[in-house]
Structures are given as structure tokens and as C-alpha cells.
């Protein structure tokens, strides 16, 4: 490079350094302080009641104990573990969230390029026929070729930090995508556990209904035989037939719900309904965790993916205030052109070199108030997102408190339902004996049967609630995503694809 172009290099380097060292307008983001709460509920948490039934184990809350990344393994179900492994490998929503994170990272890295000069090259070849006498040639005319090459440099120093604030906003959007991925992961695993529990509940309800149908069928046979012997009125037989028909009518809706639940599980696992996972679930195949880790309230805002996602949006909104403020200040665009022209097709022979450096200034003078209102809009957007953040935090604490209270209530409800089922069974036996002895009419028997049927189904549902609300607690506390790296690693490994 000739001496004409060399002075441009230190000049450009100095301007780049000036842009990188400029001030940054707008507020410097500060993370909101977590709520100062000693607990999730007004009263201390007590261990849940236990009862002798499926899902009747006592549970103890361990405050401050960390949550494992694969929290569902605490249910000690190999079938559940296998199902979730399949879903994590094939669920489309998870793949979409991973792609969104990769996109956000690429956009943030692309935004960093605005801090540095943009360099382009160009070339042009021109052929021109010139009369020979003009160039001193003995021929009538001469065809000459001119080759011109240029290097074009453009740069806008970030004197007031608008570009750096924009990059800060893009990085915050990357954090948002990251925590959206974590939220998708948590929602998927929680939905799978809930779907497995619901399947187990429906299977148990179907089994209980079939047992009741078998008992009612035997009762009808007995009544029919007694009627034939003249010991029972026809009305009792008809009433029992109606009761049996009603119980049988309860079975198809349960079977339909089970089939639809299997379709849901297949979809969550990334499969078509015609190809469901092989794993099936019963309440007996799931085990309630005896000890439930409960995060400290001061840690909840750090561990809930939805809270961290809205916090990232708050950070991005803060940075956009700086972007809007910087837009109201002067800009200093710089362009530099370095070119060389040579006769012929080679640029390495004799030729001429030219260099030009232009430093401009653009400053907004009048925009009809647009820039000022854009800044106010950015400030209002920050206030809006701040309100959303605070609502999300309140909702997170409410979710945790609701789940803790639900577990204690569920344990009491299961114990009460066990007692109610036993009492209903005893009452049905006594009422049947009384009818056989002529001490009561068959209406009393029908009432006792209905009470027992409802108690059997209620017992299954009460047991299932304990499993479902246990999963809800893990979800409300964030699911332990900070203790795992599988999905994050998958997203990182796909960056180069």
C-alpha cells in the first residue's frame, strides 16, 4: 500500500477505539430484589397424614433441600423414566424451543458486528478504444484496458452507546429464549407425569367399575332366583336391573377417556396415536416421594423459568430506553475509500493509488416529536414489563403455596375417603342382610349401592390427586433445571447445524 493510503489506518483505528469507549445512555439494568418472605404459607409446614391405601404414604417437607434435575425419578417408576426419555428426544415443542434459542444467540452475535467497521471490496475492468495518435502509437487506434480495485470502509462510532444498548437488548432476548426453553422442558415433563397419573387413575376407575358391575350382576342373579321362588317382588328385580344398567353406562366414558389419554401421551412423546409408547401406568407402579424438597422462598425467583424469562424481557426493555435516548443525539458516520487503478489486467504493476476519508455528522433537529415520544414509549414499555414481572413473581409464590396446601389437604382427603369407602361397604352388607330378613325395602339397598359405588371411584380419584399435586409442587418450584445440562447441551451442540 502506498503512503497515500497508510495514514487512513491509524485514523480508522482511533475512531473505532473512540466508538467502543463512548458513553452509554439510558439506565444500567439492576435485577429486582427477591421478595423477603420467610415461608410460602402463614403457618409452618407439617408432615402429611398417612393411611393404609395406595398412595397413602406420609410425606415430609424438607425446607431448603435442592430439587434434582430429573425430579420425576423420585416417583421410582421405570416406565415413567423411559417415557420421559423418549419425549425429550422427540417432542417437537422442545425442538422448536431449542431452535429459538439458537436463533436468539445468532442474532445477538450478529448485532455485535455493528461495533466494528464494515469492509467491502469492488473491482471494475474497462476497455476503451483510443485513436493511436493520442497515445503516440503508429497505428490508427489502440484498445486499452483499465482495471480499478477499491476497498470501501464504513463505520459509525457508538459514541452515545445506542449500538451497545441494542446488543444488550439482544443478549437479554437470548436469556429469554433460554428460559423459555427451560419452561418448555419443565412443562413437558410435568405434563407427562400428569398424563401418566391420569392414565393410572382411569385404569383404576375402570377396574373398580368392572368390579362393581360383577357384584351387581351377582346381586341381580340372586334377586332373579328369589323372585322365581316367590321370595322377592318383581319391583326389586327391576330396580336392580336399572342400577346395573346405570353402572354399565359409566364404563364407556371412562374407556373413551383412557383412549384419549393414551393419544395425549403419544403426542407428548412425539409419536402418532397409532404408534403409542409401550409404557402403561397404574397407581401401584408409582410411588409417592417420602421427602419433598422445598426451595427457600428467596431462591424461588431465580429457579422459576417463567420468572427468569419475564426478567430477561425486563432487561431488554431497560436497554431499549438507552437505544431510544441515543437516537436523539448526533451520529458520526465515517466512510473511507482506498482504490488503485492500473493499465491492463494486473493490479500489481505500475498504477495510481487514491485514498479518501470522510467523517460526517448527522444530528436530529426536528422530527415532529417522534424521537421524544419513542423514548417515552420505551420507558412506558419498561413500566409495563415491570408490572408483568411483579405479577409473575406473585403468581409463582401463589403456585408454590397452593401446591403445598393441596398436598396436606390431599392426604387428609385420602384418609377420609378410605374411611368413607369402608363405611359404605359395611353399610351395603348390613342393608342387604336386612332386606333378606325383611327388615327394609330394596330402595335402601339401592341407596347403599350408590353410596358404595361413589366411594370406590372417589377413593381412586383421591389417591391420584396426591400423585398429581406432588408433580405440581415440583413444577411450582422450578423443576430443578439448574441441576441438569441435557437440553442445554443439546441446544449448544445443534448450533453448528
Image: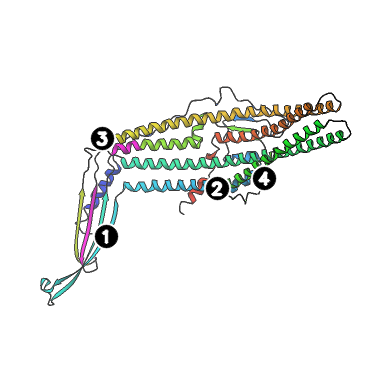
* 3D distance between C-alphas at marks 1 and 3: 40 Å
State the image coordinates of residue 245 (x, y, percent, origin top left). Answer: 74, 37
Q: Quadrant of residue 331?
A: top left
Gap between marks 2 and 1 measured at Cα: 48 Å
Residue at 69% from the left image edge and 38% from the top image edge: 283
Q: Which residue is mark 3?
A: 369
Q: Earlier in the sequence, mark 1 or mark 4?
A: 1
Foreground disc of the pair 2, 1: 2
Q: Earlier in the sequence, mark 1 or mark 3?
A: 1
Name the mark on residue 122: 1
Is residue 340 located in the magenta-colored stretch of the structure?
Answer: yes
Q: Residues at badges 3 and 2 in contact (C-beta under 8 Å)?
A: no
The image position of residue 345, as x and y in percent, is 24, 68
Q: Secondary structure at mark 1?
A: strand
226 with respect to 105 (left or right):
right
Give the crowd class for mark 3: few <14, some 14-19, many >=20 residues within 10 Å: few
Residue furthest toward the top?
43
- Residue 214, x across and y down, in percent: 78, 38
Can the viewer see residue 41 in this picture? yes
- Along the polypeptide, which appears first: circle 2 or circle 1? 2
Q: Secondary structure at mark 3?
A: loop
Q: Alpha-carbon neighbours of circle 4 within 10 Å: few (<14), some, or many (≥20)?
A: some
Q: Say which residue label 4 marks.
A: 280
The residue identified by callout 2 is 91
Q: Secondary structure at mark 2?
A: loop
- For the residues labelled 1 and 4, the Cα–Cα distance comes to 66 Å
Callout in the foreground (3, 2)? 3
> Is 1 included in the stretch rendered in magenta?
no
Q: Classify 464 as above or below 108.
A: above
- Up the image or down, 299 lies above or below 200; here it is above
Q: Which residues are magenta?
A: 320-348
Amino acid at each position: 500500500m502506498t503512503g497515500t493510503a497508510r495514514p487512513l489506518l491509524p485514523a480508522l483505528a482511533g475512531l473505532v477505539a473512540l466508538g467502543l469507549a463512548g458513553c452509554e445512555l439510558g439506565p444500567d439494568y439492576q435485577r429486582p430484589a427477591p421478595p423477603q418472605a420467610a415461608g410460602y404459607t402463614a403457618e409452618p409446614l407439617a408432615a402429611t397424614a398417612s393411611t393404609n391405601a395406595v398412595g397413602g404414604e406420609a410425606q415430609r417437607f424438607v425446607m431448603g433441600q435442592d430439587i434434582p434435575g430429573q425430579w420425576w425419578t423420585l416417583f421410582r417408576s421405570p416406565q415413567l423414566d423411559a417415557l420421559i426419555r423418549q419425549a425429550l428426544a422427540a417432542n417437537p415443542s422442545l425442538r422448536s424451543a431449542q431452535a429459538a434459542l439458537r436463533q436468539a444467540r445468532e442474532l445477538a452475535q450478529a448485532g455485535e458486528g455493528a461495533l466494528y467497521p464494515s469492509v467491502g471490496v469492488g473491482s471494475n475492468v474497462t476497455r476503451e478504444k483510443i485513436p493511436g495518435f493520442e497515445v503516440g502509437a503508429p497505428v490508427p487506434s489502440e484498445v486499452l484496458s483499465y482495471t480499478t480495485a477499491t476497498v470501501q470502509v464504513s463505520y459509525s462510532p457508538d459514541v452515545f452507546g445506542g449500538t451497545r444498548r441494542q446488543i444488550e437488548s439482544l443478549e437479554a432476548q437470548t436469556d429469554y429464549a433460554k428460559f423459555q426453553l427451560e419452561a418448555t422442558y419443565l412443562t413437558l415433563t410435568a405434563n407427562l407425569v400428569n398424563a401418566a397419573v391420569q392414565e393410572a387413575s382411569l385404569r383404576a376407575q375402570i377396574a373398580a367399575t368392572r368390579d362393581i358391575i360383577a357384584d351387581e350382576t351377582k346381586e341381580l342373579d340372586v334377586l332373579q332366583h328369589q323372585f322365581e321362588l316367590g321370595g322377592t317382588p318383581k319391583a326389586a328385580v327391576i330396580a336392580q336391573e336399572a342400577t346395573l344398567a346405570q353402572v354399565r353406562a359409566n364404563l364407556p366414558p371412562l374407556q373413551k377417556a383412557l383412549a384419549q389419554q393414551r393419544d395425549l401421551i403419544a403426542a407428548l412423546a412425539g409419536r402418532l396415536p397409532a404408534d403409542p409408547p409401550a409404557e402403561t401406568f397404574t397407581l401401584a407402579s408409582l410411588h409417592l416421594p417420602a421427602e419433598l424438597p422445598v426451595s427457600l422462598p428467596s431462591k424461588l425467583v431465580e429457579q422459576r423459568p417463567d420468572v427468569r424469562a419475564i426478567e430477561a424481557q425486563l432487561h431488554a426493555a431497560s436497554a431499549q430506553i438507552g437505544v431510544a435516548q441515543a437516537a436523539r443525539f448526533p451520529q458520526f458516520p465515517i466512510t473511507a475509500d482506498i482504490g488503485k487503478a492500473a493499465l491492463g489486467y494486473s493490479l500489481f504493476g505500475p498504477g495510481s493509488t487514491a485514498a479518501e476519508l470522510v467523517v460526517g455528522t448527522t444530528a436530529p433537529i426536528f422530527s415532529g416529536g417522534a424521537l421524544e415520544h419513542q423514548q417515552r414509549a420505551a420507558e412506558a414499555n419498561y413500566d409495563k414489563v415491570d408490572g408483568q414481572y411483579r405479577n409473575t413473581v406473585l403468581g409463582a409464590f401463589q403456585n408454590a403455596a397452593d401446591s403445598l396446601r393441596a398436598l396436606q389437604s390431599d392426604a387428609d382427603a385420602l384418609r377420609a375417603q378410605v374411611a368413607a369407602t369402608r363405611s359404605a361397604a359395611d353399610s351395603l352388607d348390613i342393608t342387604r342382610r336386612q332386606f333378606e330378613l325383611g327388615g327394609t325395602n330394596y330402595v335402601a339397598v339401592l341407596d347403599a349401592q350408590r353410596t358404595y359405588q361413589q366411594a370406590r371411584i372417589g377413593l381412586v380419584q383421591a389417591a391420584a390427586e396426591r400423585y398429581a399435586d406432588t408433580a405440581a409442587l415440583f413444577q411450582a418450584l422450578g423443576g430443578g433445571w439448574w441441576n441438569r445440562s441435557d437440553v442445554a447441551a443439546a441446544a449448544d451442540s445443534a448450533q453448528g447445524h
